[in-house]
Image (cartoon, grey):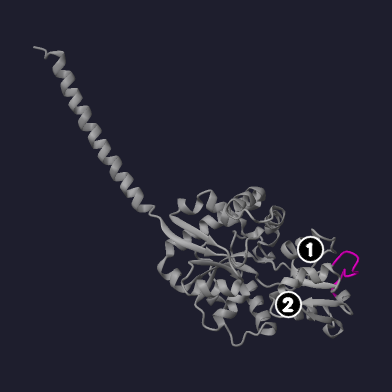
Amino acid sequence: MAQPPYVWISVTGKALIRRASVALTALISVAQASSAQTAIEKASLRLDWLPSGYHAPYFLALERGYYRARGVDLQISDGRGSTSTIQTTAGGGDTFGLANLSAMALAVSRGVPLVAIGGLIQKDPNSVISLAGSGIKNPKDVEGRRGGFVPDGAGERLFPAFAKITGIDVDKIIKLQITSSARYSILLQSNADFVVGWTFTDAYKISKQKPISQPLLFSDFGLNMLANGMIASKETLANRDKVVRAFLAASVQGIEETIKDPGAAVDAMLKARPDSDRDVLLEGAKSLSHFLRTARGANKPVGWMSAEDWDDTLKILTGYLGMSGSVPPQSLYTNDYLPKS
């Protein structure tokens, strides 16, 4: 004898409730497991200086959620020079730093426990900058001219190596000792015939006020030092492997997308640093692709650093920038934490 319809409805209802309960329990378990896998860890990045166009990739990656998607709650802080950034990163005040790699190498030679984990500006942008009409078109044209030099400036300290490679007689240069803050004004007011600075920051800012000659890039004449890169302490590498890899993966994605759309990267940066000059930032962001790699890394992934480039950097540091003793290049950098593809 067939059961009344309402019995079947009742049984089916219980089954549905039971199945829904099982499914809900499974979903909760998956969600909890997923949450555990993507637990957010705090980390910080200290820039080398005040916001500039080459910093835009980090702000783009931050705005688009690339760090958080990989489990990193990143805070970006402005810098006050590479020396300060090196100190706070080595001391654990910041998880990561963006700093001049030659300055980091000098610090490591004195016992500071840091490692470069990714290159950002690997073709040195240091150059001789002069106003249009100065007649300085080739390196030896600086002879007999007045040069403004910041005594502790990285580019100025590198100038003797540039002079040696290009045959400049430095004794024929009238050397004017200036402060970093006077670098632009002394040239713009024609109180010096040339200064040393980065092409896409210093040269561009000067060109916005007066026309300039084509800057003479040190690297175009065979002198190249690795410029800026991402650094971390040995303790961070030992204890926060996943955070290091996540930070680099998100940063590389930000760099790649900045190269494709520098305007979007600058707009993201301006949301965080609204007082910055958009034109100056955009020039730096657009120029990044030109300085991102050396010839040795032309076909390598973003951030990859060459052993030969580090060898050259150490030779220059030893010969011209006061590094004493020998530092094994392999102790200064690693490519191991960069994304594999």
Vertical order, 167 against 283 (above or below): below
Q: Earlier in the sequence, mark 1 or mark 2?
A: 2
Label 2 SS: loop
Furthest toward the bottom, the residue is: 325
Q: How dense is the environment of label 2, judged by Cα within 10 Å: few (below 14), some, or many (20 and up)?
A: many
Give the image quarter of residue 221: bottom right
* Range shown magenta: 131-139
Chief secondary structure of the magenta portion: loop
- The image shows residue 51 at horizontal and vertical percentages of 63, 61
Q: Quadrant of the N terminus?
A: top left
Give the image quarter of residue 327: bottom right
Q: Amino acid at mark 1?
A: Ile
Give the image quarter of residue 240: bottom left
Badge 1 is on which residue?
206
In the drawing, what numbered circle is on residue 150? 2
In the drawing, what numbered circle is on residue 130? none
Q: Amino acid at mark 2?
A: Val
Q: Of residues 273 and 261, which is closer to you in this image?
A: 273
